[in-house]
Amino acid sequence: MSSSKISKNSNYAVQIIEHLSKNQFKVDESSVKKIYGNERIADFPLVVLCIAGNARKGKSFLLNFFLDYLIHKEQNPDKEWTLNDKTKLAGFEFREGEDRTTMGIWAWNHIFVIEQNNGKKVAVSLIDSQGTFDNKTTYEDCSTIFAMTCLFSSIMCFNVFTDLQEDKLNDLTVFVEHGKKIAENLGGSGKLFQVIFWN
């Protein structure tokens, strides 16, 4: 994904972690603070939904469904969200072909404030991550990318294109353990996401 802003309703995806080279990553602290330090969301619990998985298997495309839903839910809380012929999925960049699109980790710059069924409001953030297991990404980099998404997320979506097979579960286990070690080294409890689901 290029560094250009991707607009949808005046909002766009922002790269918060850049993949510089082999196992070299850089956090854009300014962008992180701008997105997550907004006083508009200061009083609400924060839900961070991250998506991770193999490259070129529809992660960004799927995330745009979530994005469309959240835009609708924030603007029209009493109306049901539906997909129809007029729905235009956009926001997080995606395209056909074999060349990878998303590099590093990207967050939607607008955090949604959503009222739950119980009347309480939560802030919701969407994060897209670089795909794993393409021919340009080392296993070590794959592990680091996935570990970072584990650290960020309260809800992790592990996107699997076909059947969830043993090798994918083995990779998931290795990556999660990597994330736990990073969290512990940073002085945390080692606990990562609260919820994980497979798509």
Image (cartoon, rainbow, N blue to C red):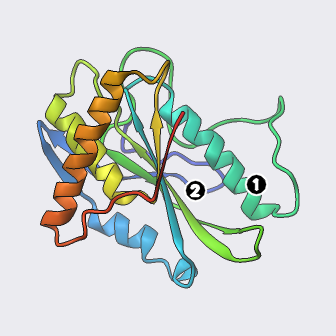
Circle 2 packing at 10 Å, graded few (<14), some (14-19), many (20+), is some
Residue at figure coordinates x 35%, y 32% from the top left: 131
- Which element carries disc 1, helix, strand or loop? helix
Q: Disc 2 designates what residue?
A: 11
Residue 123 lies, in percent from the top left, at 58, 69
Residue at figure coordinates x 83%, y 29% from the top left: 85
Left-right relation of 88 to 40? right
Q: Amino acid at mark 1?
A: His
Q: Is residue 185 above or below residue 146?
A: below
> What is the residue that sits farthest to the front in this orientation?
166
Which mark, by number, is residue 72? 1
Q: Nearer the viewer, residue 43 or 186?
A: 186
Quadrant in the picture for residue 184: bottom left
Q: Amino acid at mark 2?
A: Asn
Residue 78 lies, in percent from the top left, at 87, 63
Give the mark count.
2
- Which element carries disc 2, helix, strand or loop? loop
